[in-house]
Structure formats: structure tokens, C-alpha cells
Image (cartoon, grey):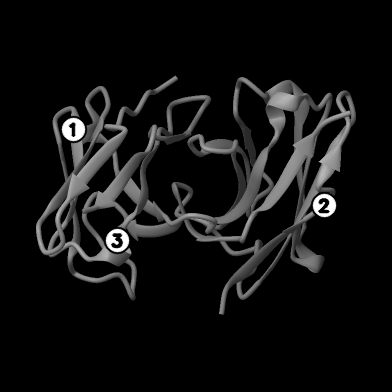
Amino acid sequence: QITLKESGPTLVKPTQTLTLTCTFSGFSLSTSGVGVGWIRQPPGKALEWLALIYWNDDKRYSPSLKSRLTITKDTSKNQVVLTMTNMDPVDTATYYCARGVAAKLFDYWGQGTLVTVSS
Amino acid sequence: SYVLTQPPSVSVAPGQTARITCGGNNIGSKSVHWYQQKPGQAPVLVVYDDSDRPSGIPERFSGSNSGNTATLTISRVEAGDEADYYCQVWDSSSDHPFVFGTGTKVTVL
């Protein structure tokens, strides 16, 4: 059974750095073709892809957010960490992690975690 | 970056067929994936690679892709199909490889 779960703060202040952890089970991030990505969704809005890390440690970022994002993995712990710097109220959203397969789609998603940016 | 455009809403009566379009430049040359998202829940993959279904997804969900439009078709619509639907493509040549559509709210009348 494949599961993913996001964890991290629910409230951050403007200018702070957000650190989110995705803890997964049921698959290995050392398997060829597998990745873990982060997608966010502001309240009432569409999904927005943020970043993805592949089994071979290749990393991809949304160009519009690349300067603020860092994605890393700890294969032994089955975890992927996303950091986003200089948080702003417009970054208020539900943040999802998801398994990427064949490098091109997301077949399993975490439940999501709502992050609010407010002073 | 690549843009995927969906109609904001589609309304359909129970038992009828819902068609949700996803427009993009020469989208027919890409593989399109579709996700269903019910209120307060995470997205669920319902169609991948234009027309394949993950295990557990009813045959009522089907997809097609040609030219500048991909379509998700839901046959014999049920009340439980009411949700937001998103298309997604992977553009290997882009610096923004994962693109989601604008989303369509399907309302079952």
C-alpha cells in the first residue's frame, strides 16, 4: 500500500522560510523512474506544480519559484523535504506531495497540509 | 510556459454524459493525464496517457486527445462524480515540465 503524508507548520509569518516534509511508504525513491513532487493549491484555486526530485537526484523546479525552492531527499528515511524561502501571504495554500511515475504524472497523493502565511 | 485551458464549469444530469475539454497548443503530441478532486480531498488520478485508467477507476471514465484538444468523458454520470477535474501534461523540453490545467467544476444537476 502506497501512502504519502505531508508535515510541517500550519502558520508561518511573512519573510520566514517554510519547511515541509513528505514521509512516504510502499515504494522506494531509489527505483528507476520514480520521483516525489510537491504541488500546491491556494484556497479556491487551481493546482500549481512546485518541484520534483527523481530517483537519481535530478531536481526540477517551477521557473517562477525556482529562486525560493529547494527539494531534497533522504532515501533511507523515505522522506522528501521542500523548503520555500521568503514566504508571503499569497503563498497561503494547501501543499501536497505526490509520487511521480514514469517521470510524467502523479499517481498517489498525500492528504495535503494547509499552510497559512500571516503575521 | 505551456498553457492548458479548461472550461470553468460543466453541468450534467444524472445518467447523461459529461465532456470536459483541455486545450493546449498541439496537445495531441503530448500525453495527457486527468485528476478528480472532490471537496476537501486530494486529487485522484482517473485517466493517464490520454485514455488509460488506473485500477479501480470505473470504465465510465474515458479520455481522448487530438490536435489542440484533449477530452475527458464521463458516461452515465452519477452524483458521486461531482468534483473538480484537472488535466495535466508533461513537457520534457520545457523548464516547466509539469503543467496543470485551469480546472473544471462538474456539477450533477
Disc 3, SS: helix
**Residues indicated by labels 2 and 1 sit on the same polypeptide chain:** no
Residue name at image x 39 percent, y 32 percent = B102
Indicate which label's residue lies in the foreground, 3 or 2: 3
Q: Which mark is residue A19?
A: none
Label count reads: 3
Q: Residues within 10 Å of mark 1 (few under 14, many from 20)?
A: some
User: Which residue position holds label 2?
Assistant: A8
Indicate which label's residue lies in the foreground, 1 or 3: 3
Indicate which label's residue lies in the foreground, 2 or 1: 2
Disc 1, SS: strand
CB within 8 Å, label 1 to label 3: no
Counting from the top left corner in percent of width and height, residue A57 is at 69, 47
Of all residues, the one furthest to the bottom in this rendering is A1
Of labels 1 and 3, earlier in sequence is: 1
User: Which residue position holds label 1?
Assistant: B69
Three-letter code for the amino acid on which mark 1 is drawn? Thr
Q: Is residue A100 visible to the viewer in this orientation of the structure?
A: no
Disc 2, SS: loop
Counting from the top left corner in percent of width and height, residue A91 is at 70, 30
Task: Classify residue A11 as left or right of residue A80.
Answer: right
Residue name at image x 33 percent, y 43 percent = B105
Q: Which quarter of the image is occupied by the N terminus of chain B?
A: top left
User: Which residue position holds label 3?
Assistant: B81
Mark 1 falls within which chain?
Answer: B
Residue B103, relative to residue A27: is it above or below?
above
